[in-house]
Amino acid sequence: MHTENKEQKKQVFLTGAAGFIGSNIATRFAEEGWRVIALVHRSSNPALDQLATEGKVVLLRGDLADMPAIEQALRKEDNIDAIVHCAGRASDVGWRSAFRKTNLEPVPALAGIADRLNVPRMVFISTTDVYGLRDHHGEQEDELPLRAHPNNPYPIFKIEAEQSLRSALPPERYAIIRPAQVWGAGDRTLTPRIVDFLKTSPWIVHFGKWKGRNRWPLAHVYNVALATFLAATDPAAGGKAINVVDNEHTTIDEFYRMLAAVYLPDKHLRTIVLPFWTGQFIGGFISAVSNLLNLDRPFADPSLYALYSVSRNLDFGNRRMNDLFARANRRPETRAVGLGNLKALPDRDKGFTCGDICI
């Protein structure tokens, strides 16, 4: 591992930098004048490579399984002003051991590095899934107990990772970002999965009592990246968990139709509502097979976890996010602007296929 010579400026060490969320976080820090040391495991991406060409990002080849090598590389730097841990396995299927290895074990190790190197702030990218997939009605972070879904290790190990971070560092030296459903230009996981289903289905399918009118909490990737930067730099964010949820109230039916209007403009989609138990039967089978094979993503939809996600009213409060933005005199990206950016993409960028599940 090695990094190149650099100007003396604030520096952030970022994991998961090649992913959708991570590359946007790298861009945000770079645009704010920081030097980004981006940990890249298997491959980079065009946005990250461009930042590296411009000298705003240094690509650090490495593996989170080799923490001594990472610490050795960071010790060569004059200063590390923040660590942002974005890497992880974001999936609704897979073996528990895989989730533990990627979503839990690196967190206390990175917190230890932050402590030994006197890094002022570590920011951990978690998820609103830690609140459980049940109906919510606008509750704020302090009003929401952590409740992992027993059938999925993703939130289980996110909760344990949050707890390990709180145990390892004093409050002023960490912050936790909990994004909801992250969307925006460049998404290669959530959006392709929904569009792939809509391409082959004559219907938009909803399950259960909400009939598609339940809130599905969106978090535009711009808002996630900006919240992460501000959480790394705002003293008042220390020790806080911050929900990142767009201000607009979007139902799951509206989101499906938003994506269809962008990616399938000529397709007319009708709506069908099925009893929740039918989805449980289908999703249970899909999840069982996908878990058995340790797939990165389910072989079909809906998985059982996805079924609960799209069939519950996930209306989370976002007061802390808005307060964070207001203190910095920043405004969140709106749904209208986000949709405009999607529509402005070249047609070649709309013909995506799903890749590895990685944030």
Image (cartoon, grey):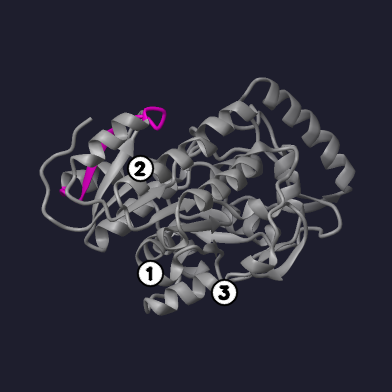
**Amino acid under disc 3:** Arg
Q: Main secondary structure of the magenta part?
A: loop
Dot placed on the residue nearer the N-terminal end, 2 or 3: 2
Q: Which residue is mark 3?
A: 319
Q: Quadrant of residue 212?
A: bottom right
Q: Which residues are magenta?
A: 54-66
**Amino acid under disc 2:** Ile
| Mark 1 element type | loop
**Amino acid under disc 1:** Asp
User: Is residue 347 among what the camera can see?
Assistant: no
Q: How many marks?
A: 3
Q: Is residue 250 above or below residue 1?
A: below
For residue 87, side relative to residue 276 (left or right)? left
Nearer to us in this view, 200 or 317: 317
Dot 2 crowding, Cα within 10 Å, few <14, some 14–19, many 20+: many
Q: Which residue is mark 1?
A: 234
Disc sitting over residue 113 in the figure: 2
Nearer to us in this view, 315 or 103: 103
